[in-house]
Image (cartoon, rainbow, N blue to C red):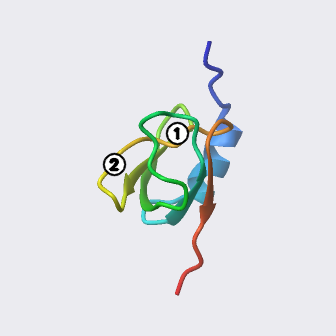
């Protein structure tokens, strides 16, 4: 059973990963996962706390908070 984040956690995620934030994949346990290191752009954070990402390789697989790991890219 999936545990949904509380409003505080959702606010934290939305502040940390606003639309347009660039990320790189660190870990994702999914057969459809993009390769580790794949970069992408956050589109939004949904009500389950998942990051909706448009990966540079064309994938649209979401990042699940507390399960998958990404790192924010430095702004240039």
Dot 2 or dot 1, earlier in sequence:
1
| Drawn side of residue 67 relative to residue 25, left or right | right
| Drawn side of residue 9 relative to residue 33, left or right | right
| Drawn side of residue 39 relative to residue 68, left or right | left
Given the current orientation, which residue lies at the most extreme left position? 58
Q: Under tag 2, what secondary structure?
A: loop
Q: Under tag 1, what secondary structure?
A: loop
Residue marked by disc 2:
59
The x, y position of residue 19, in whole percent, is: 44, 60
The x, y position of residue 9, in whole percent, is: 69, 41
Crowding at dot 2, Cα within 10 Å, few <14 / some 14-19 / many 20+, comes out as some
The x, y position of residue 23, in whole percent, is: 53, 63
Given the current orientation, which residue lies at the most extreme top position? 1
Crowding at dot 1, Cα within 10 Å, few <14 / some 14-19 / many 20+, comes out as many
Residue 3 found in image quarter:
top right
Residue found at x 47% / y 39%: 46
Nearest the viewer among 46 and 58 is 58
Residue marked by disc 1:
50
Given the current orientation, which residue lies at the most extreme bottom position? 76
* Image quadrant where one finds the N terminus: top right
Residue found at x 52% / y 87%: 76
The answer to whether 28 is drawn above or below residue 22 in the figure is above
The residues tagged by marks 2 and 1 sit, at their Cα atoms, a distance apart of 15 Å
Residue found at x 43% / y 61%: 40
Residue 62 found in image quarter:
top left
């Amino acid at each position: 059973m999936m545990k949904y984040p509380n409003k505080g956690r959702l606010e934290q995620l939305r502040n940390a990963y606003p639309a347009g934030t660039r990320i790189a994949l660190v870990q994702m346990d999914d057969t459809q996962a993009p390769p580790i290191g794949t970069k992408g752009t956050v589109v939004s954070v949904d009500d389950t706390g998942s990051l909706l990402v448009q990966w540079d390789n064309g994938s649209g697989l979401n990042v699940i908070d507390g399960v998958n790991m990404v790192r924010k890219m430095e702004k240039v």
